[in-house]
Amino acid sequence: MSSKPIAASLLPDTAELTDHDVLVGGVSLIELATTYETPLFVYDEATLRARCAEAAAVFDDGVAFASKSFLCAAMARLAVEEGLCLDVATGGELDLVLRAGVDPSRVIVHGNNKLPSELERALEVGVHRVVVDNFDEIERLRDLVSATRPLHCLVRVTPGVEAHTHEFIRTGQEDTKFGFSLAAGAARRAIDALRELSHVTVHGVHAHIGSQIFDTAGFDETIKILVDFIAEDDFDELCIGGGLGVAYVEGESTLSLSQWGRAVRAAATAAGLDPRVRITAEPGRAIVAQAGLTLYRVGAVKPVTQRTYMAVDGGMSDNPRPVLYGSGYEAFDVAQPLAARPQAVRLVGRHCESGDVLIDEAWLPESTGVGSLVATPVTGAYGYSMASNYNRVGRPAVVFVADGTARVVLRRETFDDLARLEA
Ligand SMILES: *Cc1c(COP(=O)(O)O)cnc(C)c1O
């Protein structure tokens, strides 16, 4: 770690650093914190739109935003406006995107245990694709599909590729709950079984090998395996899933969405894929992570012999990733973003857990302390969407900033909101 100022590459595209504030989308983060209070998620619309447009440009029609990484109505509409479809994995995600006014023909339904009610709704509204995951689902679909409710599907397969990433976010290997095994012949049997059903069109295969992947090797290998597998099929789509990594801390570097897409295309061409087959993908993190940051207010500082604890007004309820995956983040002091950061602290939250750590070793300016406004960048993915009400803490508000204005897209959760389920 370093004592240098925060790297601009970890901030949203429009971030401007001055000696006393940071502007994102032309809006002062200090003013945002004053107006909307903290903790606060701030998303730069320009970054979101640029990433969506980049994915739409490099892949073929049908490329989707993996909504589980960050979903609200504003985000769903933005992704669709920029040319993407939306992946959903539950009835709740499906319901939200339909409420947002997204055309069902832009929605792709995932899940390794789709409830009968979820499949029924997907067919009833006429989603773009269902990604079929297992034989029990095929049995369920057999009863639900009809002339007025036809099924357009992809078949999710496990190519047997070990992506180099955290065990809990690795999905391409054989030993996984997701999809049909290629090696064991299950994938071929699933395709055959689906093709026997009336009103079912199998458009192709889908594989998602994991998340937070930094190089093309796993994708290249997957493409080759899939292209060989479908050589005799007359499919019109091949989906490579999501999983492109993002840099969370200084020193990490990854591929851009364009570089990733071009590498996937090159691998498909090299493997001999029919050029008429549409190549699609479903990035989540790479679309939203860097567009977002979280603002916190420091409330307590406690030096002990070994280190200094700096407590902020959020924690594992708004960002569970450090606890779940041991993920690293950086921090900066919003009022002095250009200052050196020689002060090492353990940035912790306010929950009743010793494990409630946001950053094990965060570097901040010497004078950062109680009352300071501290930001953690690259928190746009799997933060709000994984947020909880642990300790009955309300979820933070979310604002989108663009062209000098901020708009609240999700308001802060109140005690009344929290009490609404009491019988
Ligand atoms: C989670 C997931 C994605 C998105 O993964 P990212 O790492 O956020 O890009 C895409 N497809 C499927 C099937 C997923 O489960």
Image (cartoon, helix red, strand yellow):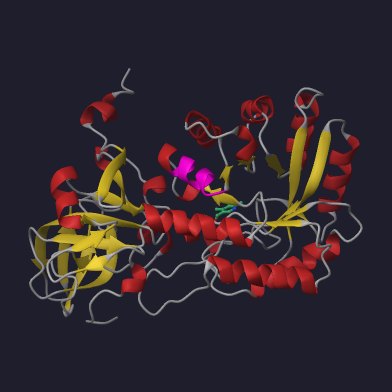
Report whether 353 appears left or right of 108. left
Q: Residue at x 50, y 67 (%)?
A: 245
Residue 295: image x %, image y %? 23, 55
User: Is 180 located above or below residue 419 in the figure?
Assistant: below
Residue 369: x and y, percent? 9, 65
Q: Is residue 162 visible?
A: no
The quadrant where residue 308 appears: bottom left
Direction from residue 82 to residue 185 in the image, left or right: right
Q: Quadrant of the C terminus?
A: top left
Residue 256 visible, this orientation: yes
Which residue lies at the image location 63% right of the left edge and 56% below the top edge? 281
Question: Total number of numbered labels?
Answer: 0
Q: Does 265 appear above or below 31?
A: below
Q: Hey, which quadrant is residue 36 in on the image?
A: top left
Please give the name of the residue rendered at 57% of the width and 44% of the height, measured from the top-left corner: 86
Quarter containing ligand 1? Answer: bottom right
The residue segment tinted magenta is 75-83
Q: In the rendering, at what x and y percent does residue 32 appear? A: 19, 50
Q: Position of residue 260 (x, y in %)?
A: 59, 69
Magenta highlight on residue 76: yes
Question: Measured along the vertical axis of the image, is residue 211 above or below residue 415?
Answer: below
